[in-house]
Protein backbone atom coordinates (compact mmCIF):
# COMPACT_ATOMS: atom_id res chain seq x y z
CA UNK A 1 0.00 0.00 0.00
CA UNK A 2 1.43 3.39 -0.98
CA UNK A 3 2.26 5.83 1.84
CA UNK A 4 -0.03 8.37 0.17
CA UNK A 5 -3.31 6.78 -0.83
CA UNK A 6 -7.01 6.67 -0.06
CA UNK A 7 -6.48 3.14 1.30
CA UNK A 8 -3.99 4.49 3.88
CA UNK A 9 -6.64 6.93 5.09
CA UNK A 10 -9.09 4.12 5.74
CA UNK A 11 -6.41 2.01 7.41
CA UNK A 12 -5.82 4.87 9.84
CA UNK A 13 -9.53 5.39 10.58
CA UNK A 14 -10.00 1.69 11.27
CA UNK A 15 -7.17 1.92 13.83
CA UNK A 16 -8.34 5.17 15.41
CA UNK A 17 -12.10 4.61 15.62
CA UNK A 18 -12.08 4.08 19.38
CA UNK A 19 -9.88 7.12 20.06
CA UNK A 20 -12.16 9.21 17.80
CA UNK A 21 -15.31 8.08 19.62
CA UNK A 22 -13.71 9.05 22.95
CA UNK A 23 -12.51 12.38 21.67
CA UNK A 24 -15.99 13.37 20.42
CA UNK A 25 -17.67 12.02 23.56
CA UNK A 26 -15.34 14.03 25.81
CA UNK A 27 -15.50 17.19 23.65
CA UNK A 28 -11.72 17.22 23.26
CA UNK A 29 -11.46 19.26 20.05
CA UNK A 30 -11.84 22.87 21.13
CA UNK A 31 -12.36 24.37 17.66
CA UNK A 32 -15.33 22.03 17.15
CA UNK A 33 -16.93 23.01 20.44
CA UNK A 34 -16.30 26.74 20.00
CA UNK A 35 -16.97 27.24 16.33
CA UNK A 36 -17.08 24.57 13.63
CA UNK A 37 -19.93 22.38 14.98
CA UNK A 38 -22.25 25.37 15.12
CA UNK A 39 -21.04 26.57 11.71
CA UNK A 40 -22.04 23.33 9.97
CA UNK A 41 -25.34 22.90 11.82
CA UNK A 42 -26.42 26.51 11.14
CA UNK A 43 -25.42 26.21 7.50
CA UNK A 44 -27.56 23.07 7.04
CA UNK A 45 -30.56 24.45 8.96
CA UNK A 46 -30.44 27.55 6.76
CA UNK A 47 -31.40 25.33 3.79
CA UNK A 48 -34.50 23.89 5.56
CA UNK A 49 -33.90 20.29 4.42
CA UNK A 50 -36.34 17.47 5.07
CA UNK A 51 -33.52 14.96 4.87
CA UNK A 52 -29.72 14.96 4.90
CA UNK A 53 -27.05 12.51 3.73
CA UNK A 54 -24.16 12.67 6.24
CA UNK A 55 -21.13 11.41 4.28
CA UNK A 56 -18.24 10.15 6.41
CA UNK A 57 -20.48 10.49 9.47
CA UNK A 58 -17.99 9.03 11.96
CA UNK A 59 -19.73 8.24 15.26
CA UNK A 60 -22.75 10.21 14.07
CA UNK A 61 -22.89 13.40 16.20
CA UNK A 62 -24.04 15.60 13.29
CA UNK A 63 -26.85 13.25 12.28
CA UNK A 64 -28.02 13.11 15.90
CA UNK A 65 -27.99 16.90 16.15
CA UNK A 66 -30.00 17.27 12.91
CA UNK A 67 -32.56 14.72 14.14
CA UNK A 68 -33.14 16.99 17.13
CA UNK A 69 -34.46 19.52 14.60
CA UNK A 70 -36.80 16.96 13.01
CA UNK A 71 -34.56 16.31 10.00
CA UNK A 72 -34.28 12.73 8.72
CA UNK A 73 -30.74 11.53 8.18
CA UNK A 74 -28.73 8.76 6.63
CA UNK A 75 -25.15 8.62 7.88
CA UNK A 76 -22.60 6.58 5.94
CA UNK A 77 -19.02 5.64 6.74
CA UNK A 78 -16.57 2.88 5.87
CA UNK A 79 -15.55 1.99 9.42
CA UNK A 80 -17.76 -0.63 11.13
CA UNK A 81 -16.82 0.45 14.66
CA UNK A 82 -17.97 4.01 13.95
CA UNK A 83 -21.22 2.93 12.27
CA UNK A 84 -21.93 0.54 15.18
CA UNK A 85 -21.39 3.35 17.68
CA UNK A 86 -23.62 5.73 15.69
CA UNK A 87 -26.36 3.09 15.49
CA UNK A 88 -26.03 2.34 19.20
CA UNK A 89 -26.38 6.03 20.09
CA UNK A 90 -29.57 6.16 17.98
CA UNK A 91 -31.36 8.96 16.09
CA UNK A 92 -31.15 8.56 12.33
CA UNK A 93 -30.19 5.69 10.05
CA UNK A 94 -26.59 4.63 9.57
CA UNK A 95 -25.05 2.36 6.95
CA UNK A 96 -21.63 0.96 6.24
CA UNK A 97 -20.93 2.42 2.78
CA UNK A 98 -17.48 3.57 1.61
CA UNK A 99 -17.25 6.69 -0.58
CA UNK A 100 -16.28 4.47 -3.50
CA UNK A 101 -19.76 2.85 -3.36
CA UNK A 102 -21.88 6.00 -3.18
CA UNK A 103 -24.38 5.61 -6.02
CA UNK A 104 -28.10 5.32 -6.59
CA UNK A 105 -27.67 1.53 -6.80
CA UNK A 106 -26.56 1.47 -3.14
CA UNK A 107 -28.54 4.42 -1.75
CA UNK A 108 -32.18 4.36 -2.85
CA UNK A 109 -33.20 7.80 -1.66
CA UNK A 110 -32.73 11.42 -2.72
CA UNK A 111 -31.63 14.12 -0.28
CA UNK A 112 -32.20 17.86 0.03
CA UNK A 113 -28.71 18.25 1.48
CA UNK A 114 -25.57 16.11 1.45
CA UNK A 115 -22.86 17.09 3.91
CA UNK A 116 -19.22 16.23 4.45
CA UNK A 117 -17.97 17.56 7.77
CA UNK A 118 -14.18 17.25 7.83
CA UNK A 119 -14.57 13.95 6.02
CA UNK A 120 -13.09 14.72 2.59
CA UNK A 121 -9.51 13.68 3.13
CA UNK A 122 -8.31 11.72 0.11
CA UNK A 123 -7.98 12.16 -3.64
CA UNK A 124 -9.72 9.62 -5.89
CA UNK A 125 -12.42 8.82 -3.31
CA UNK A 126 -13.32 12.51 -3.09
CA UNK A 127 -13.53 12.92 -6.87
CA UNK A 128 -15.84 9.92 -6.95
CA UNK A 129 -18.23 11.46 -4.41
CA UNK A 130 -18.49 14.66 -6.46
CA UNK A 131 -19.16 12.65 -9.62
CA UNK A 132 -21.87 10.41 -8.17
CA UNK A 133 -23.58 12.73 -5.72
CA UNK A 134 -25.77 14.78 -8.11
CA UNK A 135 -28.04 11.76 -8.82
CA UNK A 136 -28.65 11.41 -5.06
CA UNK A 137 -29.81 14.99 -4.55
CA UNK A 138 -33.28 16.44 -5.02
CA UNK A 139 -33.77 19.22 -7.56
CA UNK A 140 -31.80 22.26 -6.37
CA UNK A 141 -30.28 20.14 -3.60
CA UNK A 142 -27.18 21.31 -1.76
CA UNK A 143 -23.78 19.77 -1.14
CA UNK A 144 -22.13 21.35 1.91
CA UNK A 145 -18.48 20.66 2.69
CA UNK A 146 -16.66 21.85 5.80
CA UNK A 147 -12.93 21.33 5.65
CA UNK A 148 -9.54 22.71 6.64
CA UNK A 149 -9.11 26.16 5.07
CA UNK A 150 -6.48 25.91 2.28
CA UNK A 151 -4.72 29.05 3.46
CA UNK A 152 -4.40 27.70 6.99
CA UNK A 153 -3.73 24.11 5.90
CA UNK A 154 -1.00 24.96 3.38
CA UNK A 155 1.62 25.73 6.02
CA UNK A 156 5.11 26.29 4.61
CA UNK A 157 4.62 23.92 1.67
CA UNK A 158 4.04 25.01 -1.92
CA UNK A 159 0.48 26.19 -2.59
CA UNK A 160 -0.36 23.36 -4.95
CA UNK A 161 -2.54 20.25 -4.91
CA UNK A 162 -0.94 17.09 -3.61
CA UNK A 163 -0.61 14.53 -0.85
CA UNK A 164 0.61 15.64 2.55
CA UNK A 165 1.79 13.70 5.58
CA UNK A 166 -0.77 13.48 8.36
CA UNK A 167 -0.42 14.37 12.02
CA UNK A 168 -2.48 14.00 15.19
CA UNK A 169 -1.01 17.21 16.65
CA UNK A 170 -3.39 18.56 19.28
CA UNK A 171 -5.08 15.16 19.76
CA UNK A 172 -4.68 12.77 22.69
CA UNK A 173 -1.93 10.14 22.86
CA UNK A 174 -4.40 7.37 22.09
CA UNK A 175 -4.31 8.30 18.39
CA UNK A 176 -1.86 6.42 16.18
CA UNK A 177 -0.76 6.10 12.53
CA UNK A 178 -1.98 9.52 11.24
CA UNK A 179 -3.71 9.41 7.86
CA UNK A 180 -2.14 11.20 4.91
CA UNK A 181 -4.37 13.84 3.32
CA UNK A 182 -4.75 15.43 -0.07
CA UNK A 183 -4.24 19.20 -0.10
CA UNK A 184 -6.38 21.23 -2.54
CA UNK A 185 -6.08 24.89 -3.37
CA UNK A 186 -9.18 27.07 -3.15
CA UNK A 187 -9.39 27.04 -6.93
CA UNK A 188 -9.36 23.22 -7.03
CA UNK A 189 -12.13 22.96 -4.43
CA UNK A 190 -14.32 25.34 -6.40
CA UNK A 191 -13.56 23.45 -9.62
CA UNK A 192 -14.66 20.17 -8.04
CA UNK A 193 -18.08 21.70 -7.52
CA UNK A 194 -18.50 23.49 -10.84
CA UNK A 195 -17.24 20.64 -13.01
CA UNK A 196 -19.68 18.23 -11.36
CA UNK A 197 -22.93 20.13 -11.88
CA UNK A 198 -22.94 22.54 -8.93
CA UNK A 199 -22.81 26.30 -8.61
CA UNK A 200 -21.12 27.79 -5.57
CA UNK A 201 -23.98 29.19 -3.54
CA UNK A 202 -21.73 30.59 -0.81
CA UNK A 203 -18.38 30.24 0.93
CA UNK A 204 -18.25 30.68 4.70
CA UNK A 205 -15.07 31.26 6.73
CA UNK A 206 -15.84 30.79 10.45
CA UNK A 207 -13.48 32.60 12.81
CA UNK A 208 -12.15 31.03 15.99
CA UNK A 209 -13.41 33.27 18.82
CA UNK A 210 -10.20 32.94 20.87
CA UNK A 211 -7.45 33.09 18.24
CA UNK A 212 -9.42 35.24 15.76
CA UNK A 213 -7.93 33.16 12.94
CA UNK A 214 -9.83 31.14 10.32
CA UNK A 215 -11.18 27.95 11.87
CA UNK A 216 -12.30 26.22 8.66
CA UNK A 217 -14.01 26.83 5.34
CA UNK A 218 -17.51 25.82 4.26
CA UNK A 219 -18.36 25.42 0.59
CA UNK A 220 -22.07 25.46 -0.16
CA UNK A 221 -22.69 23.94 -3.59
CA UNK A 222 -26.13 24.03 -5.16
CA UNK A 223 -27.15 21.59 -7.87
CA UNK A 224 -27.56 23.41 -11.17
CA UNK A 225 -31.06 23.21 -12.57
CA UNK A 226 -31.07 21.18 -15.77
CA UNK A 227 -33.45 22.53 -18.37
CA UNK A 228 -34.88 19.48 -20.13
CA UNK A 229 -37.25 21.46 -22.30
CA UNK A 230 -36.76 21.11 -26.06
CA UNK A 231 -38.19 24.56 -26.57
CA UNK A 232 -35.65 27.26 -27.29
C1 LIG B 1 -12.51 13.51 10.75
S1 LIG B 1 -13.70 12.21 10.69
C2 LIG B 1 -15.19 13.18 10.59
C3 LIG B 1 -16.38 12.42 11.08
C4 LIG B 1 -17.67 13.24 11.15
N1 LIG B 1 -18.04 13.78 9.85
C5 LIG B 1 -17.56 14.33 12.17
O1 LIG B 1 -17.78 15.49 11.84
O2 LIG B 1 -17.28 14.02 13.34
C6 LIG B 1 -13.49 11.57 9.02
C7 LIG B 1 -14.43 10.43 8.69
O3 LIG B 1 -14.31 10.11 7.30
C8 LIG B 1 -14.45 8.71 7.16
N2 LIG B 1 -13.88 8.28 5.87
C9 LIG B 1 -12.66 8.59 5.37
N3 LIG B 1 -12.48 8.01 4.17
C10 LIG B 1 -13.62 7.33 3.89
C11 LIG B 1 -14.06 6.52 2.78
N4 LIG B 1 -13.27 6.31 1.70
N5 LIG B 1 -15.30 6.00 2.83
C12 LIG B 1 -16.10 6.22 3.91
N6 LIG B 1 -15.74 6.94 4.99
C13 LIG B 1 -14.51 7.49 4.98
C14 LIG B 1 -13.70 8.16 8.35
O4 LIG B 1 -14.03 6.81 8.62
C15 LIG B 1 -14.12 9.14 9.44
O5 LIG B 1 -15.28 8.70 10.10
Image (cartoon, rainbow, N blue to C red):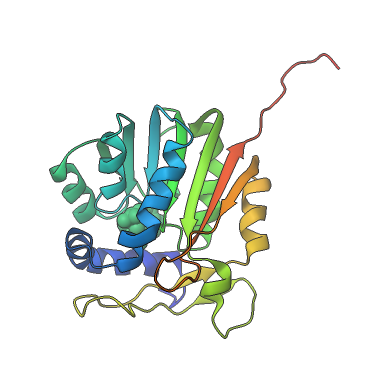
Determine whether, in the image, residue 217 is placed left or right of residue 169: right
User: Which residue occupies the extreme left position in the image?
Assistant: 88
- The total of numbered circles placed on residues is 0
Residue at point 20%, 80% (across, down): 173
Residue at point 45%, 28% (across, down): 110
User: Which residue occupies the extreme top position in the image?
Assistant: 231
Residue at point 40%, 26% (across, down): 50
Is residue 108 in view from this perspective?
A: no
Where's residue 6, x and y in %? Answer: 44, 64
Where's residue 207, x and y in %? Answer: 48, 63
Seen from the viewer's position, the closer of residues 37 and 159 is 37
Question: Quarter of the image holding residue 211?
Answer: bottom left
Seen from the viewer's position, the closer of residues 102 and 138 is 138
Q: The N terminus appears in which quarter of the rendering?
A: bottom left
Determine whether, in the image, residue 210 is placed left or right of residue 217: left
Is residue 216 in view from this perspective?
A: yes
Q: Splitting the image into four quadrants, where does ligand 1 fall?
A: bottom left
Residue at point 17%, 39% (across, down): 90
Where's residue 138, x and y in %? Answer: 51, 27
Where's residue 130, x and y in %? Answer: 55, 47
User: Which residue occupies the extreme right position in the image?
Assistant: 232
Q: The C terminus appears in which quarter of the rendering?
A: top right
Amino acid sequence: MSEFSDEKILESWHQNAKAWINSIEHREIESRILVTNKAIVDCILDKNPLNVLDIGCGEGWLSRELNNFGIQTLGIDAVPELIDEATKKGKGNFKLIPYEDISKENIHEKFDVAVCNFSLIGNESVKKIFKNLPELLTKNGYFIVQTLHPILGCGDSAYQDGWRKGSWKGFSDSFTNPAPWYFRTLDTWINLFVTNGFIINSIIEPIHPKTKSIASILFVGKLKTVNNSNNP
